[in-house]
Amino acid sequence: MNKEELLSRLKVIVSNYTQNKEALDSINEDTDFLKDLKINSANLVDVVLDVEEEFGIEIDNLSMEKMLSVRAAIEIIENKLHEAGRE
Amino acid sequence: MRLAGNDIVDLRLAATESNWMRKGYLQKICSEKEQLLIRESEHANQLVWLFWSMKEAAYKIHSRKTGQRTYAPAALETTIQTLKPGCSSGFVSVENCMYYTQSEVNEEMIHSLASPNPSLLKEIEVRISLHQDGVYPDYASTNPHSVSHHGVYLALIYL
């Protein structure tokens, strides 16, 4: 799975929780879930759970710690897919 | 250390915005001990959001202190010492740091204050205002120490 495909699937997930639709249109690796998309911090858990379901991976709490931006999320998803041998 | 943080939860908005009963949700935000207390509580919903607001209030100080942004709500371990109708007090521990908390709890909202210095909690001036349209007034000029808003509520604290 390439980065673009990953980002577009991630965008669908975060669109359900983002409060700043304009920032969603220009989503990129530097986008911050809380500061830019204004996702409520209690909904960031939903993003993590949705990512787990969408990609069939498990995100442990240690990985979740860093999941505050698109870049971090993509890195975590890539690593988990790699660990599972499903790149 | 004169540091404090606050957090407010609009319970009506939380009920529509978040489904904490979703599979896996509590495991990501609560410790084992907290999950057990929630499972056994008759007021599970209020308890979930009480824990959450305590964690958020403490996190605001902790991240300022450490200069690190992380998303690890389950690692902030809450302890409730007193729970009376309308108010609660306790503490949150994380990475060998301790933050004392005081919370106001009612049917509509939960507001928590946190500080590493327990005596400071009594000195904090709290201003909670209601904004039905979700539009908050410009408060920057009043220079609040910590700001929290959720749904119809704006909560500002001053030291």
Image (cartoon, coloured by chain):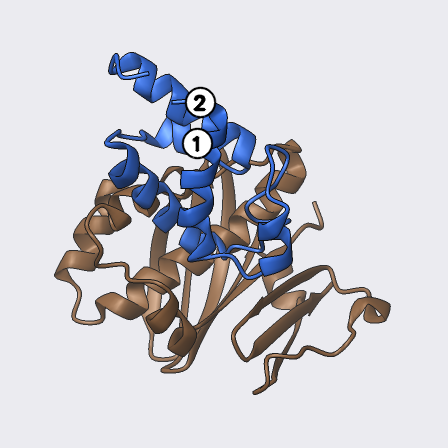
Q: Residue B158: x and y, percent?
A: 73, 66
Amino acid marked by disc 2: Asn
Amino acid marked by disc 1: Glu
Give the label on residue A2, or none.
Answer: 2
Q: Nearer the viewer, residue A58 or B43?
A: A58
The answer to whether any part of residue B51 appears in the image is: yes
Residue in view at x 67 percent, y 66 percent: B123
The answer to whether any part of residue A65 appears in the image is: no
Q: Residue B42: x and y, percent?
A: 16, 71
Instruction: Work out which residue is located at the far left of the displayed protein and give it.
Output: B40
Instruction: Name the subunit of mark 1.
Output: A
Crowd rating for badge 1 (residues with CA inside 10 Å; few <14, some 14–19, many 20+): few
Q: Is residue A51 left or right of residue B121?
A: left
The answer to the question of whether label 1 and label 2 lie on touching residues, with beta carbons closer than 8 A, is: yes
Residue in view at x 52 percent, y 54 percent: A39
Q: Nearer the viewer, residue B58 or B18?
A: B18
Q: Nearer the viewer, residue A66 or B111?
A: A66
Give the label on residue A5, or none.
Answer: 1
